[in-house]
Amino acid sequence: MAEYKLLLPSMGEGVMEATIITWLFNEGDNVKEDDSVVEIATDKVDSDVPTPVSGKIVKILKQKDEVAKVGEPIAILEIEGEGTASEEEVSSETTTAAAPDTETLKTIEEPLKTAATSTTEFSGDLYLSPLVKSIAQQENISEAELKSIKGSGLEGRITKEDILGYVSNRGNQPAPQAAPAPTAVTPQPAVSAPAATVPVSAGDEIIPMDRMRKIIAENMVKAKQIAPHVTSFIETDVTNVVKWRNKNKAIFEKREGEKLTFMPIFVKAVVKAIQDFPMINVSVSGENIIKKKNINIGMATALPDGNLIVPVIKNADQLSLSGLAKAINDLAYRARNKKLRPEDTQGATYTISNVGSFGNLMGTPIIPQPQVAILAIGAIVKKPAVLETKDGDVIAIRNLMFMSHSYDHRVVDGSLGGMMLKHVHDYLENWDLNTEI
């Protein structure tokens, strides 16, 4: 018999560790290939880890609530064969088949070789991935310079794109100032709002935040601190959209076995508006604007426990209405049933929040970092409205809806934020009743 080390798998860019929630099997239990053996939690999503081999769990290395790094062994299995194996060795054939091209390997390996002979050291309070550290060492970037780079990764970490962007603009960057020599004067702390002390009265219930609520709270505060928010509003006549959906929802459900909601239509209109105004599909990295090639739409989704998660429709501009409907239904179902994978919540370049699903007319959504804009969709309500006809103005019952567009005023001015919202409005108001699904 051989020992097999089950490693914590990679869970997408920027995710470096995960917390063990619960083991689904005990030591001594037999597991089959692809069985989910442990539930883990990252700062983005909860997910299961399957085993790529069949065998018996002989040792659990990471217990509940312990944190494991990506690539770190979390359990030892006894499998057929001799010696000791790990996930990389067992899956070497698959890895070889999916190996990156030579140019990519060269790009990664050359800095690493240089880093091996470099003597540049960085303090432990500055988190750098091995690749970023190797680039910094190769380019002789000092720690003071690194601290001046605004990271776009998880928790402000510096990504490869951040440091390469810094290198390409290095000649135009002001030299970082050396820290002054320490003096006897005690430095003043940064100004920040003190934590409120809330009195607790008899009968009050104290409810500790769960892990996800803590993450949401931290991210929301950080988002408001980073981006100066401005919100524009518009009221849209979506009568044609309502008529079109009413005509097609039964046909779509019979053909595809799935519900046809309004969300695919909203996403389609947003994607077309982003294509009209691509500078809304950007992120800010220090003094650089990163214009995103892909259009990945985040979809704010309320969970049964009251928390919020934002699964991402990748390459939404490449999907038909039918494809969008299927992707949205799939992500919403898996979000509410804790079936999302870490990569399902990463890479959004623009987000939509449907506050109308709660009966709200409008909202002022907070922009998820590092995006620069978010759209809130309000409830569709029948109202009397003035219509212009060839015979004069008339009052008719129409389906109206408010939309709220929050944008980062550092890089999105009122003209861009407002015009983009107006284009979404126009696409919805002029929705073609003959659009195919």
Image (cartoon, rainbow, N blue to C red):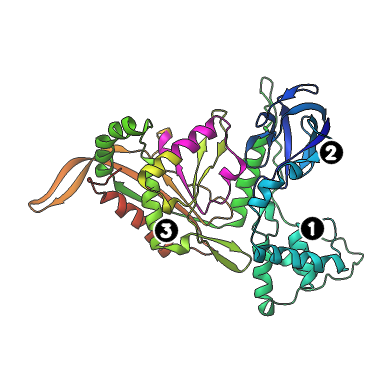
Q: Position of residue 245 (x, y in %)?
A: 29, 38
Q: Residue at x 27, y 45 (%)?
A: 436
Q: Residue furthest bottom?
A: 171
Gap between marks 1 and 3, in whole Å? 36 Å
Give, as a three-letter code, the residue at label 1. Leu
- Verify whether residue 112 appears in magenta: no
Residue underneath mark 3: 274
Residue underneath mark 1: 126
Q: Residue furthest right?
A: 184
Residue underneath mark 2: 84
Give, as a three-letter code, the residue at label 2. Thr
Give the residues in magenta.
Answer: 328-357
Q: Secondary structure at mark 1?
A: loop
Q: Residue at x 29, y 31 (%)?
A: 250
Give, as a three-letter code, the residue at label 3. Ile
Q: Secondary structure at mark 3?
A: helix
- Residue 93 lies, with reference to residue 165, above or below; the image says above
Gap between marks 2 and 3, in whole Å? 52 Å
Q: Residue at x 41, y 44 (%)?
A: 324
Query: Around disc 3, counting alpha carbons within 10 Å, would you say few (fewer than 14), some (14 to 19), or many (20 or more)?
Result: many
